[in-house]
Image (spheres, rainbow, N blue to C red):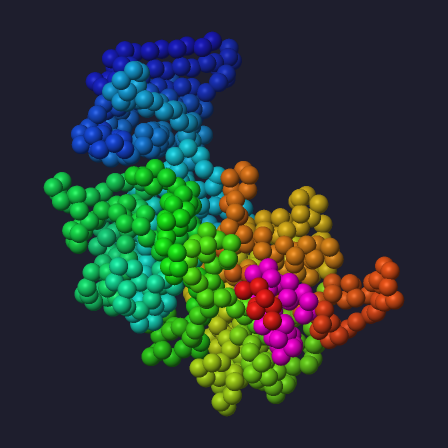
Amino acid sequence: MTLDVVKPRALPYADGIRVLSSRARDGSRHSPDRFAIQRLSCNAVVGLNPCEREDKQLVCFDVDISTHTFKTLEPENAFDFRLLARDIRQEVESSEFVSLESLASLVARITLRHANQPDDIVTVRAAKPKALVFADAAEVEIVRTSHDYPVPTKVEVSALGLPSLGLDPPVGPATLSLLAHDIAQYSVSDTSGSPPAEQHLAAIAIGSNLGDRFANIEGALRHLEPILSPKGSNTSVIVNTSFLYETAPMYVTDQPTFLNCACIIRTTETPITLLKTLKLIERTIGRTPSIRNGPRAIDLDILFYDDALIDTRSESLRGSLDNLEGHLVVPHPRITEREFVLRPLYDMVPDFVHPVFRKPIHELLLDLLKTSPVGSPAMIKVMPFPTYPYKSDHALAVPSVPVVPHTQTYWKFPPAKSAVSAARQASPPRRTRLMATLNVTPDSFSDGSDYTTLSAALNYATSSAAAGADIIDVGGYSTRPGAAYVSPDEERDRVVPIITALRTSPPNTTTGKNAPLISVDTFRPDVAAAAVLAGANCINDVHAFTGPDYPPTPSASARLADMKETARDLGVPVILMHSRGEAGANKDYSHYDTVVQGVAKELGEKVEAIVHGPGGVRRWLVMVDPGVGFSKSLEGNLQVLRDSASITADVRAENGVWNPLRGYPLLIGVSRKSFLGTILSQPDDDGAYQGRQTTPKERGWATAAAVACAVQQGAAVVRVHDVPELGDAVRIADAIWS
């Protein structure tokens, strides 16, 4: 039996309420119970047109709840229609949304919160009866569940499969406010017992051109997150960051170059309170009064706050952009004229639709680039390396946050020649960096036991530095198939003394102003931390934070969280490599169209888990390595090498999903690897060469050919053993292709 009961005029502002229930003879539920409010009338500011924002207009809602949780319809289980209608009216009439869909989403969230049952399904139809001349109404209908608005309870970090924080693929009008559920699983712990505060997403632009610019930006971000509410929970957390760019000054050109980036935060602060917080952080970092658009130690601006339209100026002052001081205007009114704002937003949310111009960020950026003056300076992607070990007077001290070391140096990555910007903008030629390989292990495949003594290691580092090595990669655990297990203590005892000696040895080419950087090749957080504190500037992890087990075990999530926290606290760049456990195993990519596709997907999932969410590593501190020679066949290695540029290409698939690795700098390591030996062992098909067996040290010329290909593919760094010889190959290849 199905019983459908409607009570007209049951509520002051609704046409009626409805209950629909179905039962079998034995009392079991035949289908979910449904409770509905019919045509609830509210008055709200909603719409994009200026006339729609001058006054409230009539908006009507049909709200339908489908639930399995009401066992009976007795009075003690009665659905409180009146309370729900009152809550909807109060919140709707105090809102100011641009899109009707956003307003409907608010009503759905209020209804789910009121019903408070995990399996409820809410359907909301929202209508503006006065919006159209020749139609009854402009309407939208949405369906939502509690999974769309999860209650923030704890920090959760998963090793794989985290939802993207970008807006891919686009579904309807993409707005930050409608994507809050994408990041709710990263929510901050709140043990107060009180209902969670309203969560909002805001995009913040960041700039600096005075002092240690990198330390200023990192200090500001670290100061932004630990702000505590009276109940002890964070009011703001950073959930995404852009790449970092060095940019020419705009408006006032006679000043130092800027660093620019952006972040997305989840916050419970109101827009005005958030603005006050940002101004306090600016003063804490050291910003002082200056001329308009002049130099500053730090600059923090609110670009978006959900999809809200905010202007605190009086109506008579809104025709000008010269009177913004002391006011808040959101979206920021100069977004569309500033590449240094649009490009960082494009890194994070390319499909976010500007609530005023109704265009996604990627279109606004393209429109701007097409009109940029020919010969204008391009924005240059940069990666900073902090100084370790640091002393108390060599660090930026920010109250209540971890110490931020000063910057030792930074690398520049000019844009690719094929980019739209490069067609009109001027940028310096790129230079491929050299990473020297210093294995302090007795069993490495190539140079085992060659550098296990301190003097031998220092001699290699000194000669490599003199030959132009930009960074020296110190490893204490061989990745050779079948290599012996090394305990964390033993690995630490191998690498830390070498790194300490490189930093403290008598003046030579490994110390001083032009000394090469040092990275530590490890997948263990405690070894990484000890190495960095001893003087390393970078972490190189061949397992991309998830450890050596493949397929990933349950411990991979904990490994990722620990390594992510270590890298984030130290503030050092990380190199994340694609691998599948032991280098010689797991070479089947048949469920992908190509090996390259498999690398991009598998490594992309890990990188997104590492960059996105609270505690994420800054995007500008991540470099990726496709793992040539690891878990790939001969043809797979060749395919990855010849098509490595596509792994980080700035493209989107046919289904609309952006490449998760787009834009990341690329490191290629091919030096002396076994796939080169396999090729050299094969005879020519129609020549006299019969093939020959080679040891790793006999593959120098073969390595040079592979390195030249890596340069042609746009690698930012190549990892080699023989720096003097292969440095020559890189310089010639750079001259040809850069």
Q: Eyeballing the image, is 615 above or below 146?
A: below
Q: Residue furthest bottom?
A: 506
Q: Eyeballing the image, is 693 above or below 559?
A: below
Provide residue 605's location: percent of width, then percent of height.
55, 50
Q: Residue furthest front?
A: 374
Query: Is residue 486 found left or right of 229 in the rendered image?
Result: right
Magenta range is 703-731
Q: Eyeballing the image, is 132 above or below 50?
A: above
The image quadrant that residue 173 belongs to is top left
The structure residue drawn at horizontal position 52% and vertical position 85%, both measured from the top left corner, is 509
Provide residue 313's location: percent of width, then percent of height.
15, 45
- The quadrant the C terminus occupies is bottom right
Count up the numbered dots.
0
Residue 422 or residue 575, whichever sits in front: 422
The structure residue drawn at horizontal position 50% and vertical position 75%, both measured from the top left corner, is 517
Provide residue 44's location: percent of width, then percent of height.
22, 29
Q: From where the camera sits, is residue 80 visible? A: yes
The structure residue drawn at horizontal position 63% and vertical position 54%, both measured from the top left corner, is 643
The structure residue drawn at horizontal position 54% and vertical position 74%, both measured from the top left corner, is 471
Provide residue 430's location: percent of width, then percent of height.
50, 66
Q: Does the magenta-highlighted stretch encompass residue 716?
A: yes
Query: Is residue 372 found left or right of 313 in the rendered image?
Result: right
The image quadrant that residue 34 belongs to is top left
Q: Eyeballing the image, is 371 above or below 138?
A: below
Q: Does the magenta-highlighted stretch encompass residue 587?
A: no
